[in-house]
Image (tube, rainbow, N blue to C red):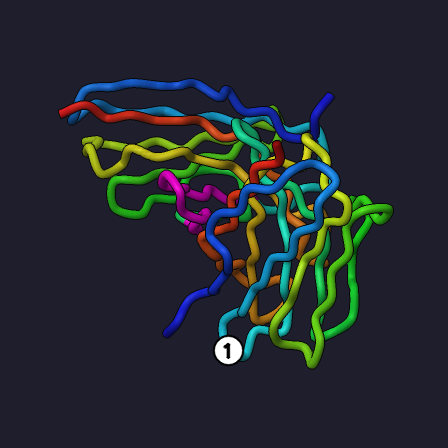
Amino acid sequence: EAGVAQSPRYKIIEKRQSVAFWCNPISGHATLYWYQQILGQGPKLLIQFQNNGVVDDSQLPKDRFSAERLKGVDSTLKIQPAKLEDSAVYLCASSFGTQDTQYFGPGTRLTVL
Amino acid sequence: QKEVEQDPGPLSVPEGAIVSLNCTYSNSAFQYFMWYRQYSRKGPELLMYTYSSGNKEDGRFTAQVDKSSKYISLFIRDSQPSDSATYLCAMPYNQGGKLIFGQGTELSVKP
């Protein structure tokens, strides 16, 4: 069974630029999560989708971050404009349902200069 | 106060040692508890989960929960160099799926 796919794996941008990350969850998984993991910290949930609807985006900085999950499968997370403090690993996870095991992708490591 | 506290380490032990990793939490509503393992440059993977107080064993790994003290532990017996990773405790915030993670403890097992 294929795992959660993410791209790109690494991205370096200047502050105030924009960037987008892509996630393809495990086939059949209705729930998709985006987490932010700052160096030396545990992952923090940014947004959770159930199919193509948002369940929780309480910790998403909505003035600069946006996410969508069209057709309830792939998802993109965008940052515009990026700040230095956005440097982190962005992890995508998926699960069959909200109470099922979450499987994580390898993450996208973002460096903002 | 963070909802979940975890000593970040790093922790370095010789091969074969018994390792003890710990977390404390403040929210008494947390009902079940997970341990994730994260290798360098990889995403976290679920190692163990447990619902109740007491011990749960899986091979060389034992998860222990003390709800009265709001304290959870992961023990690794006969540690191996392949156990070198960051170990994250996590708890579901509610039944909606959101996980609250500890800071993670970086473990290094030396041959």
Residue numbers of the magenta segment:
B33-46
Q: Residue A94, percent across and down? A: 56, 64
Let me know if residue B41 is in the magenta part: yes
Q: Residue A7, percent across and down? A: 50, 59
Q: Chain for mark 1?
A: A
Give the residue drawn at x 77%, y 56%: A66
Give the residue drawn at x 73%, y 66%: A68
Let me know if residue A38 is in the magenta part: no
Name the image quarter holding the C terminus of chain B.
Answer: top left
Q: Nearer the viewer, residue B73 or A57?
A: A57
Rendered position, B5 above or below B27: above
> Which residue in the structure is indicated by mark 1?
A27
- Horizontal placement of B19 versus A84: left or right? left
Q: Residue B87, percent across and down? A: 42, 35
- Horizontal placement of B108 versus A87: left or right? left
Q: Quadrant of residue B107?
A: top left
Kind of residue at badge 1: Ser
Q: Is residue B95 visible?
A: no
